[in-house]
Amino acid sequence: MPVKKEHPVRSENFEQLILDIAENVFLERGFALTTTTEIAKRVGCNQALIHYYFRTKDRLFERLFEKKFFAFMTSVSFRQEDNLSFKEIIRGIVHNHLKIISENPKLPFLIISEMTLNPHRFRSIAENIESAVKSMLIGLNSELQKEIMAKRVREISAFDLLLNILSLNLFMFVSQPLISYVKGFTWDEYINFVKQRGDEIFLTVWRGISLEPQKQ
Amino acid sequence: MPVKKEHPVRSENFEQLILDIAENVFLERGFALTTTTEIAKRVGCNQALIHYYFRTKDRLFERLFEKKFFAFMTSVSFRQEDNLSFKEIIRGIVHNHLKIISENPKLPFLIISEMTLNPHRFRSIAENIESAVKSMLIGLNSELQKEIMAKRVREISAFDLLLNILSLNLFMFVSQPLISYVKGFTWDEYINFVKQRGDEIFLTVWRGISLEPQKQ
DNA sequence: GTTTTATTTAATAGCTTTATTAATTAATGC
DNA sequence: GCATTAATTAATAAAGCTATTAAATAAAAC
């Protein structure tokens, strides 16, 4: 076992250590710019050891990416349970999504990046996950249709509504370097800005569909 | 001169040919995955010739990127002239921006990608362009404040309003592979979908700020 | 304790990529 | 036409990357 010898490092712990560190590197630099040499360096072991455990860079990446992609695709969720109003359901979706992505702020870039640069890999993974997203859309749509019927919400497809939420939320993360630059934000200031912006996003999404008179 | 010999290829024409082709490759694959070998192959010349004209891959990229970055940053523009209503100003901004980016659908990904992976280069370019964006924001803000004063629009910062528009518009392009996959779109179907979505985006942006009663 | 198995490393083969160099071909000036 | 300059190519050095191999070390089994 490399690096620390205090506790008996079992194979699976070490494998996990590599996975954790590799995840960070991939999130920072994407697949193409990440090298097994860099991963090994950060783990503190020989580069060959990365290949001993995962054989290829591709297999290592796919182990991580599939999990990450699933997390990304299921980051939009809503609770129908507590007989919340539709407004509160939407508020919950927006803020919950923002919170989950805030814990993985670099994930949106990685997803978009790999999706664009390696559509083949992406497609083979997407198949497994499609249904989770579609069932979420069906749930959202059934709530939405009730509201539209009751004339409390304007005509809009569940897909468009979802796109509104995803666009407004995710853009905050993929454009972080630009916004931070323009505003001169440190990382912490940026995170804080995202939090504030959550209210603004909810307001935009909700007013964008609501037919009820808005208190200004 | 390589490839076609029909017309006398002067140095500058050829330089431009390389630039045009390199632009496509960079837009498709980003800086890291683009090779001068691939560019030369598409141009139809020897790989060394790319270096003869531009010395390094980096210099070639920067020549293109600066222009592209400027186009990206100034893609949001608005005409104050024709004494349009604020609603029409916003509609114009949304649709015009969407139109310009539609002509460069791969540009948002390249910008975000390079911004994230090479913040150093990005910063050195951003400095020259910041003022253009800020003056646009000032113009928008002066119109916006008038509306807020008149209670026709709710309190919102010009920056948040701009973010709303950019988020909703640009997400359509960076998430194209995902949306096309989920919806089973061909490229043409996708472009068509973006067009339709323009109305939805304007509606969301406008209702998101307007205090006037909305016809449902 | 010795054998067997698992883990780790050093070394390196085999690619790919950028960039340079020296030689070749084409264009231009006189 | 001949000399000079520009454009183009083939060849390759240098560097970095992945993946493999063979040898060394540690752990486990008995």
Image (cartoon, coloured by chain):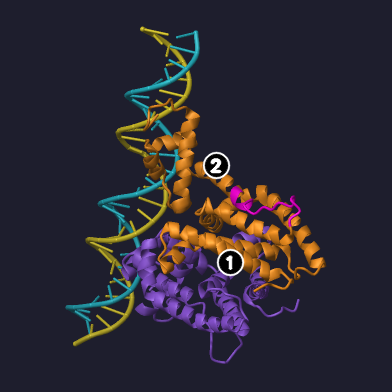
Chain colours: A purple, B orange, C cyan, D yellow
Q: Which chain is home to disc 1?
A: B
Question: Which residue corresponds to mark 2?
Answer: B63
Label 1 element class: helix
Numbered badge on residue A178: none
Q: Is residue B29 left or right of residue B210?
A: left
**Rendering coords of residue B14 (x, y %):** 46, 32
Q: Which chain is home to disc 2?
A: B
Question: Which residue corresponds to mark 1?
Answer: B200
**Residue sticking out furthest to the right:** B149
Q: Residues within 10 Å of mark 1 (few under 14, many from 20)?
A: some
Quarter holding the N terminus of chain B? top left
Foreground of the two, A11 or B12: B12
Amino acid of disc 1: Glu
Foreground of the two, A161 or B67: A161
Residue drawn 49% across the image and 62% down it? B193
Tell me whether circle 1 and circle 2 mark residues in contact (CB < 8 Å).
Answer: no
